[in-house]
Image: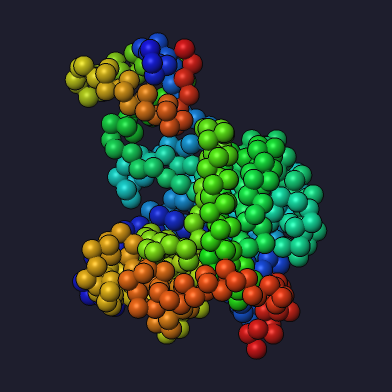
Amino acid sequence: MASGIDAQSRPLLERRFRLQWEAAQQAHVLLYPEGMIKLNSSAGEILKRCDGAATIAEITADLETRFATSGLYADVVSFLAMALSKQWIAVTP
Amino acid sequence: MSGTAPQPGPPLWLLLELTYRCPLHCAFCYNPLDFARAGRELDTEDWLRVLREARALGAVQLGLSGGEPLAREDLETIVAYARQLGFYTNLITSGVGLTEPRIAALKAAGLDHIQLSFQDSTRQMNDFLSSTRTFDLKSKVAALIKKYEFPMVLNVVLHRLNIGHVEAILGMAERLGAEYVELANTQYYGWAWHNREQLMPSRAQVERAEAATREFRQRMGARMQIFFVVPDYFERRPKACMRGLGSMFLTVTPDGTALPCHAARMLPGFEFPNVRSSSVAQLWIESEAFNRFRGDAWMKEPCRSCAEKTKDFGGCRCQAYLLTGDAANADPVCDLSPYHSLVTDAVARAERGGAEAKPLVFRNVENSASLSR
């Protein structure tokens, strides 16, 4: 597909970023050289599952179980396509 | 103090200036002119306590700077503790002293990133501008940074004498494998303020440098991020300096003085707190020095009634003081400031280029002692 990712892609956080929970900000943040991106809660939940092993299908299923909902796939892919374009993540097919 | 100011947010950015000792003598350094008179440096235990207390308040980005932070033998201890607390650790260095054993130890301590300064793209100009022979050493350090897989930010301060070399500087950054390049036009504080007439570029120089940067950026695509920090004297609106003093930025100087920005030490009429006698929470939340410029109750016209005050916070307090004598005035970079001509006059003098016969005053202990006598 155009974004270069699909259900079987395995996303991995790029090496130059560090993802961590910040209690003072009540948010996950992406840390990088001299910079910080404050993530909203769904972005944080998706990115913390990007370990290079789980596929997007598995990440979606995990989120749907965790938050007792369904139909998240389109949102997850659309967020990860954006993250890929910003080079927050890399993917292996 | 502005009684209406809300409880401040966390000091997200913590800059520790571990020492004023520095092997370089750059004429554009922002360190105070009288650094040679500063008191005794903090001990290791003091620095670790500052880290612990600031982290508890929510500080997360940590800059380790100076002077040259590698002059501190306890740098590895400080990095390891900071990393363990959850800081993202940035080492801001000239590269002098970054031997292979030390870079290996810093890697083991968990250092996240290294920002390496160059003064220009050639040995001759780098060594002239830093008043040292360090170009070859810096090139070797850049290779070590790659070897140990640190993300590398290359920082070059731009001014009249090197701004014409932007293409060559970016070419050097590409050869060295930098992921990020900061082309930081000189901001006029400290030694740079003292040497302003010699350092200020012409408008044509700035425009050529911006065009060269744009071209290079297009060619590199996503492989290299290039930041061009604009020289604010050429703008019509001020920079949102520190996003307002006391909002998110905290500097601790080598002797423990806590500042709301790294240039603020020269502001008169302040009693800046010291971490030796005050906890980070006390000085950040309660001290008069950190509260004075919070909110907007301190503002005068034209800022007070200006719609853009929430965007630029009136600009830079230090620049307002240096140019107008009153830190509460609008930053005169703003063309709504009645003092704006002080900025345009300085730019006009740079256009004429009349000051080049005057020598640069390099940042060293002897010059500091004589300037602060």
Who's the residue at 70% across and 37% down the image? B175
In the picture, measured across the screen, residue B193 lies left or right of residue B264, that is right
> Residue shown at 69%/54% (left/top)?
B120
Judged left or right of residue A34, residue B316 is left
Of B129 and B97, nearer the camera is: B129
Q: Nearer the viewer, residue B311 or B94?
A: B311
Percent of width and height locating residue A88: 44, 31
Q: Which of B284 and A35 is in front in this view?
A: A35
What residue lies at 48% left-to-right and 24% top-to-bottom?
A: A90
Q: Where is residue B15 in the image (x, y as percent from the top left)?
A: 51, 60
Report which quarter residue B147 is drawn in. Answer: top right
Q: In which quarter of the image is residue B240?
A: bottom left
When the figure is inspected, residue B190 is found, relative to residue B174, above or below; the finding is below
- Which of the 4 quarters of the picture holds residue A73? top left
Q: Residue furthest bottom?
A: B373
On screen, B293 above or below B47? below
Q: Quadrant of the N terminus of chain A?
A: top left
Residue B149 can be seen in this image: yes
The count of marks equals 0
Model colouring: rainbow
Please identify the residue farthest to the front as the structure is shown. Answer: B352
| Residue B267, image x, y percentages | 46, 79
Residue lying at 66% horizontally and 57% vertically, measured from the top left: B162
Front position in the image: A30 or B80 = A30
Residue A64 location (% of width, % of height) = 24, 19
